[in-house]
Image: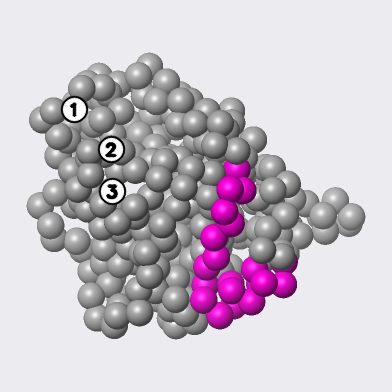
Amino acid sequence: MDAETRLKAWNEQGFFVMRGLIDPAQAKAVEDEVIARIRAYPPEQHPGEAIYQAGPDYAIFPEKEPSPTAANPEDRIAKVFNCHTEGMTRHIAESDAVANIVEGLLGPDIDCFQSQFIFKNPGVIGQPWHQDSYYFRFDRQPQVGVWLALSRATRENGCLWVLPGSHRGPIHDHVPDRRPAANRAYTEIVSEDDSAREPALMEPGDMLFFHSFLMHMSTDNVANERRAAMVYHYGRTGTLPINDEAAASLAPVNRWIPIRRKKVEAA
């Protein structure tokens, strides 16, 4: 997909998928790195904690209700934030293959401010319809989400669903997700027509680029395998939280690293 086609899809649909953009061996290395960190800082050492640190940057969110059959520490984890500050995860975040595409959407001066490794273990419920900019609360919009498939993403194991064109609307009202097993931070959009939704079926190494206003969700994992993904979020250099409250809420899960500095360096 060339740059013109990508920009057209971004403007009209709010997303596009780049097939095979990342070597599956690199995708596997990302997963191995994160699992190694979790095993070095297992959740059993942090009982009752909604989030805990694993080194200077990694922030680990255990499952609210882990499966009783979970055999390994990673089977009890929902998400790991801030993986993009080191290792293969950072290498991919900074790679020309990814940064060139993000630059074409946001302009020449870009940072990666957040990453999430999402395990989506068997039996885990999905995340309801939401827009990422509802959570980010920045003074500059939009941001770019980049969803790297580390395993197959299927209807059975809880793939993403997107609502094409929804990025052209406003940030909608979000209400708390009241499901008993819901992630502590989940909210949902309940008042919008989602009849035009599409599944994002992906293979390891595929990347979904999406607008931070785009409505998206995922379904429950009813398969017997994990649906693993690494999600990067990029913003324009100089982006700031809208106020002190937003800054405080974002601090545990945001780590800004420079990706491109063309205009800044030229000055």
Residue contact between numbered discs 1 and 3, judged by CB atoms under 8 Å = no
Residue contact between numbered discs 2 and 3, judged by CB atoms under 8 Å = yes
Q: Residue beneath label 3, please?
A: 157
Q: Residue beneath label 2, please?
A: 225
Q: Amino acid at mark 2?
A: Glu
Q: Nearer the viewer, mark 1 or mark 2?
A: 2
Q: Residue beneath label 1, please?
A: 70
- The answer to whether residue 146 of the structure is visible from this angle is no
Residue 24 placement (x, y as % from top left):
54, 37
Residue 78 placement (x, y as % from top left):
29, 40
Q: Is residue 54 above or below residue 209?
A: above
The magenta segment: 3-22
Q: Is residue 82 above or below residue 244?
A: above
Secondary structure at badge 3 equals loop
Q: Residue at x 82, y 55 (%)?
A: 262
Dot placed on the residue nearer the N-terminal end, 2 or 3: 3
Secondary structure at badge 1 equals loop
Q: Amino acid at mark 1?
A: Ala
